[in-house]
Amino acid sequence: MKSLGDNSLKEIYFAGGCFWGTEKVFKAVPGVTDTEVGYANGSTDDPTYQQVCTDLTGHRETVRVIYDENIVSLGDLVRVFFIVIDPTVKDMQGTDRGTQYQTGVYYSDNADLPVIEMLFEAEKEKYSNFFVELKPLECFWPAEEYHQDYLDKNPGGYCHITSDEMREVQNYFRKDDPQNARQCAVHR
């Protein structure tokens, strides 16, 4: 995992259901320099995947995203997150069920909170039910090595994120399409 020694590098944590697909999405975003899957905000130190799957640890399958804020904004990353999750369900995404699949955004820099809150409020207005967590990062434990870059190592592996959602993310960053021009430059 890259350090944040470079002043333009920042981190944010996304729990978007199964971390394999969520990692794949963010690895494809221009300006994301590194990702790492793991378990966030639970009560057990250094949990295993088997422990997290019991629903007893409180951990969420989460992706640590390191990004260059000179290339991609936090606002863009949060918008991408909302493209690929269903915010109207609790403790599940796709066919995956359990507390480890609860969606959330966990921040490590309090200065990021106003941007995230603004985008959360806009998303909440779209739905009668909204179950996405927004919390400070309490802890993050890297997942076992076989989970890291899982869909790169297993291209036909399971992914709850649809090909349409992946295309929507790709189109979001197309600079030649004025319909998909990013709207958040002011939030950098």
Image (cartoon, rainbow, N blue to C red):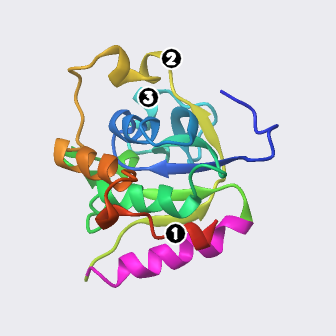
Q: Is residue 32 visible?
A: yes
Cα–Cα gap, marks 3 and 2: 11 Å
- Which x, y percent locates residue 105? 51, 58
75 in relation to 168, above or below: below
Could you give the CA–CA distance between mark 2 and mark 1, rounded to whole angstroms?
35 Å
Which label lies toward us, 3 or 2?
A: 2
Regarding mark 1 in the picture, which secondary structure is present there? loop
Q: Is residue 141 left or right of residue 77?
A: right
Say which residue label 3 marks: 49
Residue 188 placed where, x, y %? 64, 65
Q: Tell me what residue is drawn at x 35 percent, y 53 percent.
A: 176
- Inter-mark Cα distance, 3 to 1: 36 Å
Secondary structure beneath dot 3 equals: helix
Q: Amino acid at mark 3?
A: Tyr
Earlier residue among tags 3 and 2: 3
Question: Crowdedness of circle 3 by 10 Å Cα count: few (<14), some, many (20+)?
Answer: some
What is the crowding at mark 1: few (fewer than 14 residues within 10 Å), some, or many (at least 20)? Answer: some
Residue extent of the magenta highlight: 111-127
Residue with the mark numbered 2:
145
Residue 115, image quadrant = bottom right
Q: Amino acid at mark 1?
A: Cys
Amino acid type assigned to the residue bearing label 2 in the image? Glu
Instruction: Give the image location of residue 22, x and y in percent.
Output: 38, 41
Q: Secondary structure at mark 2?
A: helix
Q: What type of secondary structure mainly makes up the magenta span?
A: helix
Residue 184: mark in rendering: 1
Q: Is residue 40 left or right of residue 157?
A: right
| Residue 35 spot, x, y in % from top left | 54, 34
Q: Sequence-wise, which precedes: disc 2 or disc 1?
A: 2
- In depth, the one of 25 and 180 nearer the eye is 180
